[in-house]
Structures are given as C-alpha cells and as structure tokens.
Amino acid sequence: MTSTEPVVSVRDLRKTYGAFTALGGVSFDIERGETFALLGPNGAGKSTTIEILEGYRNRSGGDATVLGVDPQTAGVEWKARLGIVLQSTGESGNVTVREQLAHFAGFYPHPRDVDEVISAVGLTDKSRTRIKALSGGQRRRVDVALGVIGRPELLFLDEPTTGFDPEARREFWELIRELKREGTTILLTTHYLDEAAQLSDRAAVISGGLLIDIGRLDEIGHPDARIPAVRWRDAAGVRHEERTTEPAGVVAALYATHGEVMGLEVVRPSLEDVYLQLVGGSAAPDLAEELS
Amino acid sequence: MNTIALGLRRARYETRVYFRQGDTIFFTFLFPVVMLTIFSVAFSATGNVGTNPDGTGGISQAAFYLPGMIAAGILLSGVQNLAVDIAMERSDGTLKRLGGTPLPVVSYFIGKIGQVLATSLMQIALLITIARFAFNVELPSDPQKWVAFAWVYLLGIMTSAVLGIALSRVPRSGKSATAVIIPIVLVLQFISGVYLQFSLLPVWLQNVASLFPLKWMAQGMRSVFLPESFASVERSGSWDLGMAALVLSIWLIGGLIAASLTFRWIRKDS
C-alpha cells in the first residue's frame, strides 16, 4: 500500500436490517492525515457507517477498505493500527484509570506512555481512582485515552464529547489537534457542529442513509444558504430581512433613504443554519439507533 | 507480545477485578464456605455420619459435607462465575471494547481460565483450611488420594470453565444473566449430592443427575475425602472414578466445541 492511497475508502456502502434500509449506498474517501467528520441527525446512518468501518458490523452491499484491508475479515494486526472510541458504554469500572490504561497499552506493539496519555486527557489527579467513581465526562475521557493508547494510525471517534462541559470540550479539541499534528487520520461523528468546524478538514452529511453532501466545512450546503442577511425594523417596528451578496450596499441604500434604522444587523448564516437547511425535511426516523 | 503472555496478563487483571466485586465474592467465592459452616453447625446435634450400629465411629457432618462443597465450589467458580461474568461483559460493552483492540480471543480465554483456576484454588484452600481447623476434619494422608484430587479438580474446573463460557451465550442481557444461570447451578447442586446425600435420592433422579458433570465431580471428591467404607453407598458400590473421568471428558470436549462455535465479541447485526 502506498501512502497516497486513501486510509478509508467507501463505495456504495449499503446496510439493511430486514425491510429497513439503514444505509442506501454511501461513498467517500478519507486521506492520510485528514480529520473527517460524519454529520447527520439521529438515525441517519452515522453509527452504522462507522461500525462497519470498525469491523463490528457486516455490510449488506458495496465495498469498504480501511488501511487497505476489508474490515469484515481483518485480523488483530489490523486492529493494532486502529483506535476506537465507541459511543459511551456502561462497564462496571472496578479498575483504576491507570490500571486500565496500563493493561490496554499491553495489547499494542508500540503504545504511548501511559502517564502522558492520562495527562493529555486531564485525568492525572484521578489516575488512582476507580473508573466507576468518575463522573460521566471523566469516564468519557478514559474512553478517549483508551482509544489513543495504542498510537493508532486511524482513530474513530463516535460522539466523543457527549457529556463534556465546555472547558473539557476545548481541552479535548486541543488533544485531537495534537494527534492530528502527529499525523493521525481521524473519523469523527458528532452532533456539535462547532466541534466539526473546529476539528475537521472535510465533512460528509448523511441523512436517511444517504450521503447528501460532502466537502470542506465552508463548502457544504447550497451556496444560497450562505448568503448573508440584512435585518432591520422600520419606523412602525415591523421587521424586515433581505438576503444579499452585497450587504454593505443594502445598508448604504437603507441609510440613504431612511437614515439610521432600528435593530440593524448583518448576519452570516452559521454552519448550524446551513446544516439544518441541508438535512431539513429529509430526517430519518430513529430506527437505526434503536436497532444498533 | 504473544498470545500466551497476553493471556497471563489478562489472568492477573481478571483475578484482581474478581476480588473487587462484592456480589461475586459472596455468591461464588464464599458461598460453599458459608454452606459448609451452616450444614456442619446445623446438623452437629444429629451426630456422626456412617456410624457403627452401637453409635461409635463414623465421620463428622463437616467431614461428610466437605467433598460436596469442594465440588460445588468448582462448579460455581467455573460455570456460574464465567457465565454471568461474560454475559455481563457482553451487555455492558466490555467485550465490544476488547473486540476493537488487537487482543486475541485466545488470550481473553486464557485470562478467564486463569482467573477461574486462581480463584477456585484459593476457594478450595479456604474450604479445606476451615474444615481442618474450625471443624477438625481429618484430611487424607495417602498421596494417591491427592493424585485423585488433582485430576478430578483439573478435569472438573476445566469442564466448568468451558461450560460457563458456552452458557454465557444463553442470557439475552446482563441483567437476566443471574436469573438464567443461578437456577441451573442450584438445581444441579441439589440433585448431585452436594446438599442432599446422593444415595438417598430416588433412583430416577440419580440417573438424571448422572448425565451432568457435578454428580461426578462430587463423587470424585468423596473418593478423596471420605473413608473407603463409604464407597459401598455409591450406586455401583464403588467410587467409579473411570466413569467420572469419562463423563467429565465428554462434557469438557462438548463445552469446548460449543464455546468456540458460539463465542463472538459482539452480537453482530442484532
């Protein structure tokens, strides 16, 4: 395998559960060193996609290769090159943070230093605490630590920051940027669009089991969705909004005719607005999450 | 790191975690000790078992129950412990997490079996120590008896461990695991001569019990710890160790096949 080959390659990936189609033919590539986000509403097929790539589920159709190998038949040498952070689990946690990380480090050929990883996820003071005594957010950090302990080439992060407070999320982002600087390829699913915007180079939006858009974060969505809006109120207090590619001109024209107007603002649609417009109306029922 | 070395690491880790779980310590590790104590104390007024017509001789209640409790301990440490433990690990996400790491399945099983060996040996040591020092039970001095103990124990514990692994597949969730497994194990203990004297059971029930491994583990342990004169009470009038070896081996092989065919890190596509 050459280094120019994509780390993840998915072609027409399909997954059906009986009559229900969880994935109806999804294609994308993830290049080496890239951070790629999978976005979409609950039940859209994000977790199904990521679990097929992790080797947990068999696909019903299409092709997938991960690090040059078919995940459906891959063995332990392949797993040694991956890091997997699943959606939260409910393990009994009768081991300390340090015991758990030291134990898992032993599974991998070239693990990271246990104490460095504990420090990177901000759990140094909790390293001798049993995992069951940690808060939800702290347990999630242990999950992330276990995902990176084996020095993975490819890291899967399935909704990694659920339950984090804002400060913990920012610290987590810093950790992910550090992994990215070291060349780790990352596949991320998240509900937080700011998180996707902060971390990812490219994103794919999945809805109803289909890929509805893919591209850089500042590219996804219909170009019209990104047109800024000028808003103001007239003398009678009635709200006005005008979508325009030339907001300064609109404001100048407003000023020329009405002078200073009330409540004047120029708004650029946020990623969230663009995303909501993109998935609006095509949101799938939560069936796939229930099945998973 | 190779598969065996990783398995030994798992065994150390699993054994450490085992002793941090209060419910396992009571219902698996201490249970036979508690039962031996209760039976010995409760029936002490009934006098010795197997006395001469004039009421002399025989052995104490503790001595009489010790082999059955050792056999029950082997069953609990293997079947109950692993079936419940692995069913829980399947439902709480432990297996899914391990399945995403390069840990080989064989290392995982070496770890489980290592934990079962370590904890059951400690359990038997505790049982024998209490029987010897609290209830003054005389232990066999004939080395041949200890050889029989060793092979009955090893064959019994390996059979129990693989059957535990195979049975872990039966409960649909971790929450239902104890409800599914404990009745099986409890019924076996009642019909296999652990709590009730085997020779007093109706013949048809003895025949049913003879299909299962616990009866043979208990009988094998009786051959080690009870005086030779007690052999006459057994079904065939002897300890029948050859039959014990045969039945246990069949269950061991059957359990191995079932465990290796049914074990998966996760229920794919459930």
Image (cartoon, grey):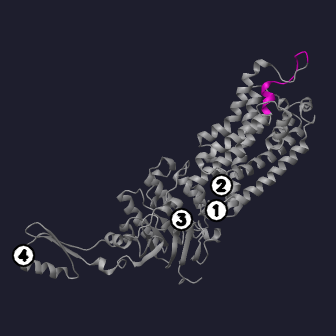
Which region shows up in magenta?
Answer: B53-66
Q: Is residue A292 visible?
A: no
Question: What whole-number distance in Å separates the C-alpha atoms at marks 2 and 4?
Answer: 77 Å
| Residue A3 sits inside the magenta stretch | no
Residue at the spot x=54%, y=72% of the render? A153
Residue type highlighted by circle 3: Ile
Quick one: label 2 or label 1, which is nearer the N terminus?
A: 2
| Label 4 with label 3: CB-CB less than 8 Å | no
| SS category of the residue bearing label 4 | helix
The chain letter for the residue carrying disc 3 is: A
Compute the Cα span from label 4 to label 3. Answer: 59 Å
Evaluate if marks 2 and 1 touch, with contact meaning CB atoms under 8 Å apart: yes
Say which label, 4 or 3, has the lower sequence index: 3
Q: Which residue is mark 1?
A: B103
Count of numbered marks: 4
Q: Residues within 10 Å of mark 4 (few under 14, many from 20)?
A: few
User: Residue under mark 2: which chain is it in?
Assistant: B
Label 3 packing within 10 angstroms: few (<14), some (14-19), many (20+): many
Instruction: Please tell me whether mark 2 or mark 3 is closer to you in this view.
Output: 3
Residues at discs 1 and 4 in contact (Cβ within 8 Å): no
Q: Nearer the viewer, residue B79 or A118?
A: B79
Q: Position of residue B263 (x, y in %)?
A: 68, 58
Whether marks 2 and 4 lie on the same chain: no
In this figure, which residue is indicated by the disc labeled 4? A258
The residue sitting at 76% across, 20% down in the picture is B44
Give the labeled residue for mark 2: B10
Left/right of residue B146 with respect to residue B112 in the rendered view: right
Q: Residue at x 70, y 26 (%)?
A: B38
Quadrant into which the N terminus of chain A falls:
bottom right
Query: Local crowd at mark 1 within 10 Å, few (<14), some, or many (≥20)?
Result: many
